[in-house]
Amino acid sequence: MIEGRSQTVIPEHRRDLIVPALVALATLIVFSGALRNGFLNWDDETNILTNPCYRGLGWANLRWMFTTMLLGHYQPLAWLTFALDYLVWGMNPFGYHLTNILLHAANAALFYKVALCFASRPTVGPSADRSLSPGILAALAAILFSVHPLRVESVAWVTERKDVLSAFFYLWAVYAYLRQHLAGRPSGMGWKITCWVAFALALLAKSMVITLPAVLIILDFYPLRRLPGDVRQWFGASHRRVWLEKLPFLVPALIIAMVEYSGERRLGAILTETAAAHCARAALGLTFYFWKTFWPVNLCPLYESPIPFDPFAWPFLVSGAVVGIIVLGLILSYRRWPAGSAAWACYVVTLAPVLGVVSFGSQLVADRYSYLACLPWAILTAAGFGWAWQRARAWSRGFLCLGLGLVLAGLIGSTWRQVGVWHDSETLWKYTIALRPRTSLAHNDLGVALAGQGRLEEAVAHYREALRIVPDYADAHYNFGNALAAEGRLDEAIAHYREAVRISPARTETHNNLGGALAGLGRWDEAVVQYREALRIVPDYAEAHNNLGMALAGQGRLDEAVLHYREALRLQPDYFEADNNLGNALFGQGRAEEAAAHYREALRLKPDYAQAHNNLGSILAGQGQADEAVAHYREALRLAPDYWEACYNLGRVLAKQGKVDEARREFREALRINPGLEPARKNLDSLRNMNGRP
């Protein structure tokens, strides 16, 4: 595909090290802005922030990595790299982004080696008189790939580690295959084994690389010429070996395909659509990635599928026509320009898993899907530059260099800006809404980001907009309910939780939070039903066990409450709220010593837990340890100055110690915080009578 000459400007042994190193360095610099980015509330939260399972390399961690289908994906190799990140960096996003960037830079260097295999072929190109060396053209192809803004989503989004990791092994497999046959020793086992192992590792990082065997067959056609130009001759006896050597690749491919499909199906992400809808998605996808490669403007993190989906809308019809024209043109130029047909075939085959034959999720297209699929366009663009350079006059080559420089500068500038879009959740979703205002997921997730900053009114506005766009959006109802509950509007929150349950009845968090809102209104029986339903769906849900314990305690069923608190602590030993609640239940049963032990454990886990300080103070006061009790009450008030229970309890202990003035001050403070606290008023009146003055 790439034209080049056999002699090189840099000696070959030095070129093999220096040029890919420079390509990798340039890539690192262009994407270095991602090191300032954080985690996002789009899958990063589920995969990284709230997921303790990947944090370590113990047997339990490894077993989870190789068996989980979290969010519907099987990616054990990606989980291993996240585990290593955690061991080195903890929860600092800098390290996770650094790994993504380093992998992308390694891919750029490896792609240089792949492109060099194409550029060094003596059969590539119409002329042996070449003006640019293969190394220059291969470096240009690698740079065009690596600094392109379509790469940003795969690199700047921590969750998409699987893209850059699977691409590394994919490129390694392609390079091994090319080296195997370019070396003229197709029977050699070393490169064959390397190719198969790299493919297997790529599959363990991301299933989209499943199409590699088909890509290798296309490479057998061009540039390797192991298959003739006449497709009818491909299946003859003389070419049987080409097909048989692909059989070992089918075994891991089929296994991963079944595993991935089952995971997506369990998640409910597979869409059932008409044949026309599948064809429309495929045509739009093929046109979209091709167009954005050569005109990468207005790139968006999320391109949601229109609702309702009309396969006969004009964007799909135009895309179908464009694809038809491209295919017709390639058929007509098939013999004169086989590189074009091979590039298009590789492009289509690589995209096949995400073209809508099986539709996953709500996205119509995604920038990240272009990571491997658009490699042929980088090679062809570099080849085109080499072709133009060879035919240009000396005076016009300066304009060619200027044009190339402007293109690269534009790509680099666009990539740098696009990396900044992924800086944080608020920036990401505001950018998305600016480009595509009717993206319901963007409004919902922006609402979540704003709610996390305490900006509930702004969050509610975006939840409303998300529901205006998609009324049956379960996540938006759930998050809307959370915001209303945080504002104390429990009746409204319950309505949204119930709607979320209606749309998505298997979501445990919705049942749990609905139970919390019902409990907040004292509707204990209904709360217990919701908590039990959450535990029916996920029996090991520690938070639901704790909350069910609270609801049972609210009904006076302390024995049952204790059992659920203990189960919550078995599932999550560092669950300090469960320790505190278990202490409350034990205290209610008259088991003060056991209760004190759990309050102390809660404080060991969270020393600034004001409620546990207050509760432990009450135990100590009842045991006659007044000074220790006072110390805990004062610490509770230091941590939570408006904690009226601690004020009242402190006043009672001080009064018993005869510290009347201090006790009076605490009772007055408790009444200021909670004017309806009659026990504090009675105690204050009693102290006034004792002292004979107001």
Image (tube, helix red, strand yellow):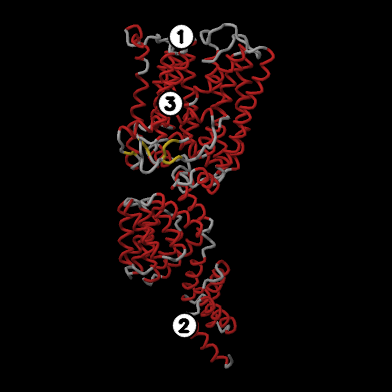
Which quadrant, please, contains the C terminus? bottom right
- At horizontal 46% and vertical 49% (from top left) the residue drawn is 50
- The residue under label 2 is which amino acid type? Glu
Q: Quadrant of residue 211?
A: top left
* Distance of label 2 from label 3 (alpha carbons): 78 Å
Query: Closer to the camera, 16 or 363?
Result: 363
Single out the mark in the foreground, 2 or 3: 3
Classify mark 1: helix, strand or loop.
loop
User: Mark 1 and mark 2 in contact (Cβ < 8 Å)?
Assistant: no
- The residue under label 1 is which amino acid type? Arg
Circle nearer the N terminus (2, 1): 1
Q: Which residue is mark 2?
A: 678
Circle nearer the N terminus (2, 3): 3
* Distance of label 1 from label 3 (alpha carbons): 41 Å
Q: Position of residue 578 (x, y in %)?
A: 42, 60
Q: Quadrant of residue 630?
A: bottom right
Q: Position of residue 566 (x, y in %)?
A: 37, 59
Classify mark 3: helix, strand or loop.
helix
Residue found farthest to the bottom: 692
How would you rate the neighbour count of disc 2 (Cα within 10 Å): few for under 14, some for 14-19, many for 20 or more?
Answer: few
Q: Which residue is mark 3?
A: 322
Residue 185, numbered label? 1
Q: Position of residue 473 (x, y in %)?
A: 38, 50
User: Mark 3 and mark 1 in contact (Cβ < 8 Å)?
Assistant: no
* Distance of label 2 from label 1 (alpha carbons): 93 Å
Classify mark 2: helix, strand or loop.
helix
> Is residue 69 at all visible to an observer of this figure?
no
Query: Closer to the camera, 377 or 629?
Result: 377
Residue found farthest to the front: 314
Query: Closer to the camera, 56 or 517?
Result: 517
Circle nearer the N terminus (1, 3): 1
